[in-house]
Image (tube, rainbow, N blue to C red):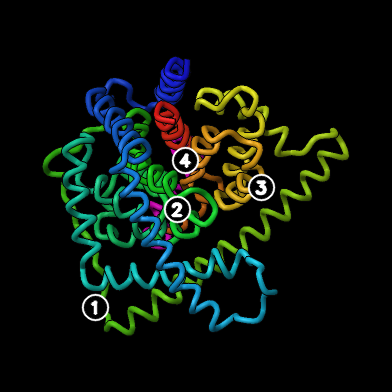
Amino acid sequence: MKYLIGILGLLVVFGLAYLASNNRKEIKYRPIIIMVVIQVLLSALLLNTKFGLIIINAIASVFGKLLSYANQGVEFVFGGIANKGSMPFFLNVLLPIVFISVLIGILQHFKILPFIMKWIGLVLSKINGMGKLESYNAVASAIVGQSEVFITVKKQLDKLPPNRLYTLCASAMSTVSMSIVGAYMTMIEPKYVVTAIVINLFGGFIISSIINPYTVTDQEDILEVQTGHKQTFFEMLGEYIMDGFKVAIIVGAMLIGFVALMAAIDNVFEMLFGLSFQHLLGYVFAPFAFIMGVPASEVVAAGGIMATKLVTNEFVAMMSLSDMASTFSAKTLGIVSVFLVSFANFSSIGIVSGAVKGLSEKQGNTVARFGLRLLYGATLVSVLSAIVVSFIL
């Protein structure tokens, strides 16, 4: 039965993407089929094999060790502020982003990350039927983040037509940056975080290939990566420390605002209608939860968490999932966890268009015009990844 529901889910996702396609005659079906098969195989490898367990445990242990180092710095500065035994979210989940950001900066400074991103992107371009720039951008988005990635391709930004720009922005919204992966792993199981990151990479190409199909000519298929101005090692350290701290502060501020707003809206809805806003949204998203493979008895609750992610952000939704984890089956936890690992939410429209506008005002305005279409595609990527995982769980 789960396979029938999974196939139905795939057909619904592809159908919704097809309805939004701007050039249905250009859709290349062969790369799409290949990438869906790759998604299923990678999910099976990571979630259902001993080798996958070794990989997940290795990655989790690396991030666990990094977070322990980060916590030493946090403890040195903020030790004694929190009550003994407590786990303040800002100190234990957000501030370690600063240390992870520093490590990314070091790998960037010594040209290790640009080399990895460029060559993985070149390999992916042979699979996905897209250009080298699009493939590089997807990998880079998953490592350096949805805002910073555009800086690395700013040489080509002004030259890009709207269709290629859409694919770049869709990749940025469908993935998550490596700097906050450690924060996610403190809230949901690491195996779902790693699996989602890997299959979202292909999911972004799949949905973009349907919604926004085009062919890149050999003359257009050029990759120019901007490495930035030359800095000394300690200048770079200072910049990435401040960048990481800004991210932590911004996420913290957004959480304060969104959590407070959700509490207020929930209270108003409970007074007026006798049920919370999240519960009401759960009914709207329940059909999507069903085609993702969530058991019928849990679709409304799961749908509420999915909706929370869309209207607020993934951190708020992960907190809700943590609070309700004991009421969900293991399968539902896995499916919803994978769905949550992306930047597909309304606030990301502003973040992505703002990042592009900071480098090119004309292209930033272009991104703002197709912002809702971007979010539509990125949300379908999250649903697709969850469906793929449902075949394995």
Which of the labelled discs sits on residue 390, or is there none? none
Give the quarter of the image for residue 302.
top right
> Answer yes or no: do the residues labelled 1 and 4 have beta carbons within 8 Å?
no
* Amino acid type, callout 1: Lys
Q: Mark 3 and mark 4: span between their CA atoms?
A: 17 Å
Residue tagged 4: 338
Mark found first going from the N terminus, 2 or 1 = 1
Mark found first going from the N terminus, 2 or 4 = 4
Mark found first going from the N terminus, 1 or 4 = 1
Per the image, is 366 magenta?
yes
Residue 340 in the image, given as x and y percentages of width and height: 51, 43
Outermost residue, front side: 50
What span is colored magenta in the figure? 357-378
Label 2: state its secondary structure: helix
Outermost residue, left side: 218
Residue tagged 3: 323
Residue tagged 2: 352
> Answer yes or no: do the residues labelled 2 and 4 have beta carbons within 8 Å?
no
Q: Nearer the viewer, mark 1 or mark 3?
A: 3
- Any part of residue 320 in sight: yes
Give the quarter of the image for residue 157.
bottom left
Mark 1 residue crowding within 10 angstroms, few (<14) / some (14–19) / many (20+):
few
